[in-house]
Amino acid sequence: MTIGQRPAGERPIVEARALAKSYGRPPAQIKVLDGVDLTIRKGEIVALQGRSGSGKSTLLNVLGCLDRADSGTYFLGGRDVSTLGREAQAWVRLHYIGFVFQSFHLIARSTALENVELPLYYAGFGRSEREEIARGLLERMSLADRADHVPSELSGGQRQRVAIARALACGPKLLLADEPTGALDTRGGAEILELLRELRETDGLTVAVVTHDDTVAKMADRRIRLRDGRMLTEEQYAAEAS
Amino acid sequence: MLRRLLEVASHAFDTMMRRPAQSALTVLGLTIGVGAFIAMVSFGEGARRSVISQFEALGANLIKVGVASVQQTHGRAAHPLTDQDVAAIRRETTSIRFASGVVQRDADATRGGKHHWTRTYATVPRFATIHNWRMSEGGMYDDADLARRAKVCVLGMTLVRELFDQTDPLGETVTVLGGLPCSVVGVLASKGHATNGDDLDDVVLLPLTTATAYLGEGIGYSAIEIEPQSPALLETAKTEVTDVLRRAHALSPDDFDDFRVSSPLEVVRAVDRTTQILSHLLQSIAALSLLVGGIGVMNIQLVSVAERTEEIGIRSAIGASPRQILRQFLAEAAALSLAGALSGVALGMLVATIVAAWMGWPRVISPVGVVTSALFGIAVGVVFGYLPARHASDLDPVEALRHE
C-alpha cells in the first residue's frame, strides 16, 4: 500500500495545517478543533494540555488516524494521511502509531502475552514469531514473569506497561498517550514517564502526551496548550495564567 | 492464506469456547432447526416406506375386479362375477398372466370347543404367491388338491393362536365356513397389521373348488384377481379387462360398468403422494424453524457485539481494519453455526431413531439429507451472522473506546 508521497529528508513526523473539526449542525455547532497548526519533529516529546473540552483528545485521535478532521492537511512521516479511507487509516495505525490510554484498554479475557501479540496478529505475523516478539517486549518492560496473567491479576503500573509493550509491537514511529499516568499513583506514574523517556533514547520514538499533570508536562521537550480548539502561544498562556 | 484462515477459525473457536453457556444459547435455535429438519425428513421417509411395504404385502402387481354397488351401476342389478367372466378374461386379453375367481366369506372356524370368526378365502394355489404370503409351516395346497376338491386348508397365525395351544396344527382338522371340516396342510407366515389396523393374519385359505362344491355352484365370485404380465402393463390390463367384462355382461355403450376394477398399486401411489405432501409440509415447517434459529444467532451476536464494543474499539485502535473485524465476527458466527449444525445432526438422528422405534417404522436417515440440512444450518447462521458482524466493523473506534 502506498500512502501519499515518499518521505523527503528529515521532514518532521507530524505536519498538521489548519486542522478543523466540529460536531453537530450549524445552529448548535461546537468547534472542537479550530485551525490547529502543529509540527512535531522526530524524537520529540510533546505534551498537549488544556481543560476538558479544549480539543486535546480529539487532536490526539486525529493525529493517530483514529478520527478525521473536517478540513486541513495532515502529513504523517511525510505522507498525506488526511483523506484516507477507514481501511487505510487502520493500516497506518497498525504500522506507524502506538496508542496508550488512561484506562489501559487491555482485552480483559486475554493474557498479557496475547494482548501484546494482537497487533502482530493483525500485521500478519505467524504464531511463533508473534510470541517471540511479544515475549521480548514484555521482558523489556520487566514483565516476563507476568506474560500469562490476565489484566485483572496485574497492578495498574504493570497493566500500563503491558499496554506500552502492545503499542510498541509493530515498531511505531509515533506514540500517542492519553493521560497515561492518570490512573496510576505517583510512583507508578513516574515509572511510566521514565519508560517513555528511555524509549525516546533507545528507539528514537516520537511521543505526544495528553495530560493535565504538570510533572508529566515538565518532562516534555515542549508544551502545547489548547483552548476552545485553538493553540495558545506562550504569551497568550502567560497572560491567561496571571 | 490457508494458515491465516486456520488462525481466524481457531480464534473464533477459542472465543466460542470461552463463553460456553452463551454460545449454547446462541446456537440452540439452529440445533433444534437442523435436528427437526433431519428428523422430519426421516419421519416422512420412514412413514412412506412403512405404508408402501404394507401395501406391497397385499400384492402390488394385482388387479382386482369386484361387483359394483347399486350406486355405482345407478340402480341396475349387477351381473355376478362368474366362471364365464374369468374364461373370457383369460381368452380375450393379451396383457394378463393369470386370472382366477376368489370367494370370500366371513365365517366361524372351529376346532374342538374353540371357535373364531375369521375371513375365509377360497382360492387357487397361486393366490399365496400373488399376495406375497410366505409359509411358516407346511405348504400351500396345490393344483392336485384343487382338482380333487381336497378338504384342506392353510391357516393364518391369528387362527393358529386362537384355535391351538402350543400343539402343532399340521394334520389337525379345523371346521371352516361354519361346517366344512378341513385338514391343515400349512401355516402362513405373519404379516402383522395393516395401516388401518386390520389383522392381516386373521385368515384361512382353502381350495376354490372345495368351497364352491360346499357352498353350491353358481354362487358367483366375490372377486376376480388378475395378475398382469408385468407391473408396467397394469393400466393396459385394466383397460382390456374392462372391455372384456362389458362385452361379457352385454352392456350397451350408455350403461355404467357393473363391476369395479382396482389395484393396490393405485392405492400405493395415492398414499405415496399423500405422505410426500405431508413430509414436504413437515420439512417446510422444519426449514422455518431453522430460519428462526438463524434469527436467534443474529440476536445473540448483536448482543455480543454490543457487550464487546470496547474490545472492538481496542482492536480498531491498535490497527485492526474494518475488514478484519468483519471477518472475526463472521468466523465466530460460522464456528457457532458449525457447532449448532453438528449438535443438530446428533439431535435429529437421536429423535429419528427414537420415533422410528416407537412407531415401528424403518429408521431411514439419508446421508444427503443430513449433509444438506447441516450445510443449510451453517449457511443460515453465517447469513444471519453477517448483520452483527457488519455492525461491529462499522463501529466508530473513538465512540467504541469511550464505551465501557
Image: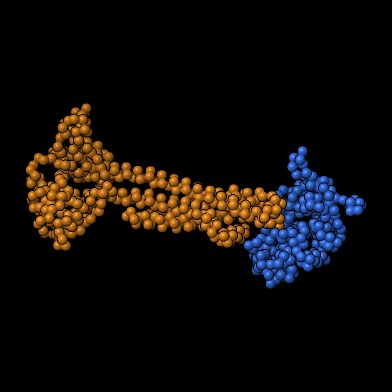
Residue B172 found in image quarter: bottom left
Front one among B182 and A193: A193
For this orientation, the residue located farthest to the bottom is: A145
Front one among A22 and B197: A22
Confirm whether residue B171 shows in the render.
yes
Residue under the image location 42 percent in, 47 percent down = B283
Front one among B117 and B129: B117
For this orientation, the residue located farthest to the top is: B254
**Looking at the picture, does residue B133 appear above or below residue B236?**
below
Query: How far from the left and from the top, in percent, is residue A127?
Result: 64, 65
Q: In this view, does A131 lie to the left or right of A68?
A: left
Query: How far from the left and from the top, in percent, is residue A92?
Result: 74, 54
Q: Is residue B265 left or right of residue B286?
A: left
Residue under the image location 71 percent in, 67 percent down = A155
Q: In this view, does B371 lie to the left or right of B203?
A: right
Q: Colour of chain A?
A: blue
Quadrant the N terminus of chain B occupies: bottom right
Q: Which colour scheme is used?
A: by chain
Confirm whether residue A15 shows in the render.
no
Q: In this view, does B269 lie to the left or right of A57?
A: left
Residue A157 found in image quarter: bottom right
Residue under the image location 64 percent in, 63 percent down = A110
For this orientation, the residue located farthest to the front is: A242
Residue B224 found in image quarter: top left
The chain assigned the colour orange in the figure is B
**Looking at the picture, does residue B362 appear above or below residue A153?**
above
